Image (cartoon, helix red, strand yellow):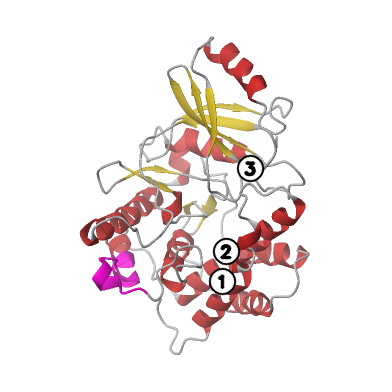
Amino acid sequence: MGGTGPFPSDALRDFLDSTFGPATGVAFERVAGGQSNPTYFVTHGKERMVLRKQPAGPILRGAHAIDREFRILRALHPAGLPVPRPILFHADPALLGTPFYLMERVDGRVFADAALPGLSPSERREIWMALSDAMAALHAVRPEEVGLDDLGRPGNYFARQIARWTAQWQAADSGQIPELDRLAEWLPANLPPEDGERRIAHGDFRMGNMLFHPGEPRVVAILDWELATIGHPLADLGFCCIAWHSTADEYGGLLGRDLAAEGLPEQAGFVARYMARRPGCGPLLPFHIAFALFRFAVIFVGIAERARQGSAASTDAAALAPLARRFAIRGCGIIDRPGRTSA
């Protein structure tokens, strides 16, 4: 019933029958990919849904907060943001071993590889620009307007985030990564001035967490809200820009590719598209990308730990463990770059 254990389909079938009425054609299918919360396609008669649950095993305080995910979907869907319609949240772990929620299943395309293989050069650029537009649309929403103003504490977002992820790294039992230690020391010493920006920060805004329209360059669903909080929009933008600072074998990055020949935008063009839709937003700095790489590295430390404990949501989690150090090395490359005045 956990990350890789058996799925209690009979219990869920009975629950769905009692909730929606008896139905034929009931089916459950594990969704491949994802490193955190196990996800399943659920078909119950005419209902096509997605189920998200916590993994089994020990869970860090505040991690795998699927109740938080469900609350965010419930707030953003009526506001017109591209998120799946939430259906129900089930808090009692007795049924599936952990709490879970159901949301509508949206048809669309997922691109795990930032290089977008299989698309034409013109389509690739349009997809990347659509990703930028979706991020700008999310950050245009004021948290208080959708009832999410208490999703995170106000002010000092980057300082608090650095402290949180540093503590998680220091508590990990995964060996030494000196580059991570260096970033943990550099980041708090190089915080940008507080500018008062307070928006919904997705926390994992990247190509692989978007669902695109089946035939149009348009995001129809932003997925995986586990890490969302009230934060700074440039944290999401910096995180999305990791693609230009990592290689194809580092979680599908773009570094080393002939971007122009493949129709892929430069980072500057992607960022400019975002800025055009969010006038007044502060500049993206090397700090923001270094912070994103530091945080992503610590996330991969956690993935490696869950793999060792046998509670990882993905069967390839152990193979991804080396990425923690590789992303930390990339982060150090950002802060070592001469003339660090812009990203």
Asked if labels 3 and 1 touch by Cβ distance under 8 angstroms, the answer is no
Residue kind at label 1, given as amino acid type: Phe
Tell me, yes or no, if residue 309 can be seen here: yes
Foreground mark, 3 or 2?
Answer: 2
For residue 65, the mark is 3
Q: Position of residue 308 (x, y in %)?
A: 74, 56
Horizontal side, residue 198 vs residue 320: left or right: left
Taking the spot 68% from the left edge, 77% from the top edge, the residue there is 181
Residue kind at label 2, given as amino acid type: Phe
Magenta segment's dominant SS is helix
Horizontal side, residue 172 vs residue 45: left or right: right
Taking the spot 41% from the left edge, 73% from the top edge, the residue there is 255
For residue 296, the mark is 2
Query: What segment is highlighted magenta in the picture?
Result: 257-272
Q: Which residue is mark 1?
A: 327
Q: Quote the CA–CA distance across marks 1 and 3.
A: 25 Å
Specify which label sits upstream in the sequence, 3 or 2: 3
